[in-house]
Amino acid sequence: MEPEIRAVFPHQLNPINSLSKPITNRKPVFLRAKWNHLLFANYEVDSAVLGPLTPGGTTLDSWNGITFISLVAFRFSETSLLGIPALGWRNFDEVNLRFYVKCLTDGKPKNGVVFIKEIVPSWVISKTANLLYGENYKNKKMNSSIELLSNSIRKIRYEIRDSNSSNIFSASVEDSGKIPSQDSLGNYITEHYWGYAARNTKSTVEYEVEHPQWNVTEVSDYLITFNFEEVYGEEYSFLSEIKPQSVFYCEGSEIAVRMGRRLKL
């Protein structure tokens, strides 16, 4: 069953931006979609927590000396694989927990992300992604909604329903934001265009994600009621006890995910 999406007066919502530059000929594009209505909650963490999870060939990244984990919720729409519409799950939600790394390949530094776990509503999605990219996808019951509270304020809500809890990440968003300054946290969090996943201790998969630079809206009115231990694992239970350093929203855009490759370690 697809997650519920309720959009009140959708004609008043800002349109999703298109890719601002053509896709270049590198690895073939595997997936195209739109990523809509992204919520980010960014937590300061001790780098020692993430060190053992860093894939071979990468190093932990930081912003102003601070290491971050981000809880990210968003909506996939118009999904296609190898140019073919993904029938049955073109539109779905994802809520992931991720951190940030750097990698030097092909003679140039790359800013990347590592996903601790990615929650989606379908076992088909999780099995496909785990097989192709070696990432930790899990399927759980999910739903989401977009509600227009006034002419300028939207409430965006994502929910994961687990066996013993209902995990919610919601925010009231007042505007469509602006391009963040180059030295800002918003720019740091959103300007990571590579994904890395450890297949095993001797193999790391690298893949590229393409999208235009996003507008970022800082959010002060939000709700996060997550049992991080139950959803993401015991080692992340501490996130339930602390507040994020920042929360922000991105309208989103068209995206392209390229086929991965294994790094030579």
Image (cartoon, helix red, strand yellow):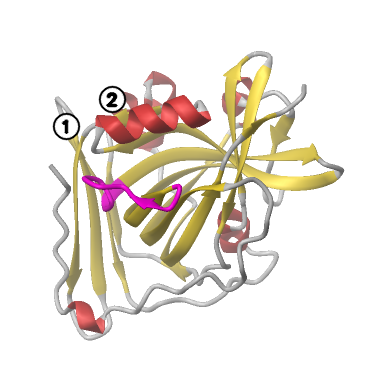
- For the N terminus, the quadrant is top left
> Measured along the vertical axis of the image, is residue 188 above or below residue 121?
below
Q: Is residue 157 above or below residue 107?
A: below
Kindly identify which numbered label has been placed on residue 230: 2
The residue at the point 45 percent across, 67 percent down is 218
- Please report the bounds of the magenta region as a residue range: 82-93
Q: Residues within 10 Å of mark 2 (few under 14, many from 20)?
A: some
The structure residue drawn at horizontal position 39% and vertical position 73%, both measured from the top left corner, is 16
Q: Quadrant of residue 149?
A: bottom left
Residue 184 percent across, percent down from the top left: 63, 64
Q: Residue at x 30, y 59 (%)?
A: 222
Point out the image quarter for the C terminus: top right
Expressed as whole percent of the image width and height from the top left, the position of residue 4 reads 14, 53
Any mark on residue 43, and which?
none
How many residues crowd around disc 1 within 10 Å: few (fewer than 14), some, or many (20 or more)? few
Which badge, 2 or 1, is on the more N-terminal residue?
1
Seen at 49% across and 51% down, the residue is: 245
Pick the residue in front: 181 or 8: 8
- Cα distance in 3D space between marks 2 and 1: 8 Å
Left of 195 or right of it: where is 102? right
Which dot marks residue 165?
1
